[in-house]
Image (cartoon, rainbow, N blue to C red):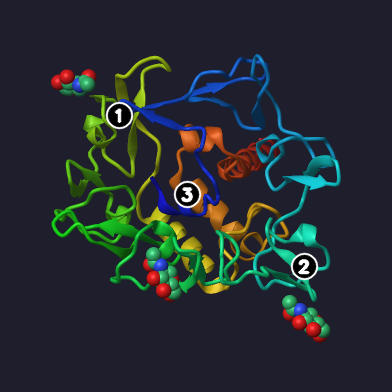
Amino acid sequence: MIKLFYLLFIFSISIHLIYADGCFKFQVLNQFEICDTPGQVCGPGLFCHQSDTPVCLPLNPAGESCWNDNECAKGLKCYRYDADSFCADVYYKGYGEKCINKAECSRGLGCINGTCYASEEANCFRGSCPGSQYCNSTSTCNNFIEDGSRCITDDNCFPGSICVTDPKSGMSFCTKMNTVAEGLPCNRQDLCDISQNLVCLNGYCVVYNDDKSNAACNVSTACPLDKERCICNNIESTAGECTQTNMIGASCKTAKVEYYNCLKSSGCPIFVDNPDSANACVSKQCGKLKCTYESECIDPTSPDAQSSNICVNSGSKIIAMNSLIILLILLVLL
Ligand SMILES: *[C@@H]1O[C@H](CO)[C@@H](O)[C@H](O)[C@H]1NC(C)=O
Ligand SMILES: *[C@@H]1O[C@H](CO)[C@@H](O)[C@H](O)[C@H]1NC(C)=O
Ligand SMILES: *[C@@H]1O[C@H](CO)[C@@H](O)[C@H](O)[C@H]1NC(C)=O
């Protein structure tokens, strides 16, 4: 999977998406449909309301009561205040950012002397470290690891790099995303140079050939990673079909690199609780680039686009608007 999707997962794609028996179980549901089977996701603007019979309901706007974050519209979190909890634009700042109210700071941080602050610096948690640091497995903040140096998880590497395991040595190193050339080995998505239309298939970066798309599959690695994914034929099935989920090419790579370079140079805390808030540093500084990246690289029909509120939808709005303008121009000309 795309690292920062997990890392930023921050810009959290996916908790709903389940791999089982190799193929990717995935079904998009409409409002009021029952969402009780793993792999089922409620469509854009909806969430799965947990009850005796879970059903897809519209996400809650600011001020509506909630139990969990996933009930709130994009950019909002479930804010607990005394005995009350409601969706609100909160928890968008990270360690060291200026604050007036604790609600602005990610959970677990206080607003102390006007700064989001973790009192137990010696015992960090994800989100309690300064901008260019991560919290390691023994709860100490460390600087992000440079490319070429050893790492344990993607979170350890700078934005735009992932922790890649060398199958020979079993050791892992931070590696810049999408830089592996044609013919060289690969073992995951986000490695091959997508600007050259390369995908990871059968362990090597090869030029994508869509002749093979829609092939039957039953393991995720049977499909050309970075472009297609093995999606189960239906929610019960363990057999699937390689399905396009991503767009590749020069403009996707450029948009992706620009977005991650922005995150890296922004100095923003990366692991804040509410990175989608318009008030989050990452949104203010890199939000437009994120939208461009998502609309250049993610197929709007893919699970990632359908199951999380990424920007692909605003991308298609722009396209819709452009067609409207073209239509108006045509009408005027006629
Ligand atoms: C907050 O400011 C006070 C007064 O300047 C100082 O004594 C205290 O140590 C500061 N607290 C933190 C956590 O920096
Ligand atoms: C976490 O970081 C601290 C400080 O750099 C280091 O001493 C410790 O060994 C690290 N833990 C792991 C599991 O690498
Ligand atoms: C997966 O597909 C291959 C090729 O179609 C087939 O030989 C194999 O038995 C399948 N495995 C499972 C677990 O269905």
Callout 1: 10 Å neighbours few (<14), some, many (20+)? some
Name the residue at 77% across, 51% down: 89
- Residue located beneath label 3 in the image: 5
Which tag, 3 or 1, sits closer to the chain's start? 3
- Residue located beneath label 2 in the image: 111
Give whichever of 284, 56 is nearer the camera: 56
Residue 334, numbered label = none
> Quick check: 120 above or below 88?
below
> Quick check: 238 above or below 283?
above
Name the residue at 47% across, 32% down: 17
Q: Amino acid at mark 3?
A: Phe
**CA distance separating discs 3 and 1:** 20 Å
Give whichever of 217, 164 is nearer the camera: 164
Q: Is mark 1 within 8 Å of ligand 3?
A: yes
Q: How many labels were placed on the picture?
A: 3
* Residue 179 point in image, percent of width and height: 29, 61
* Residue 223 point in image, percent of width and height: 26, 35
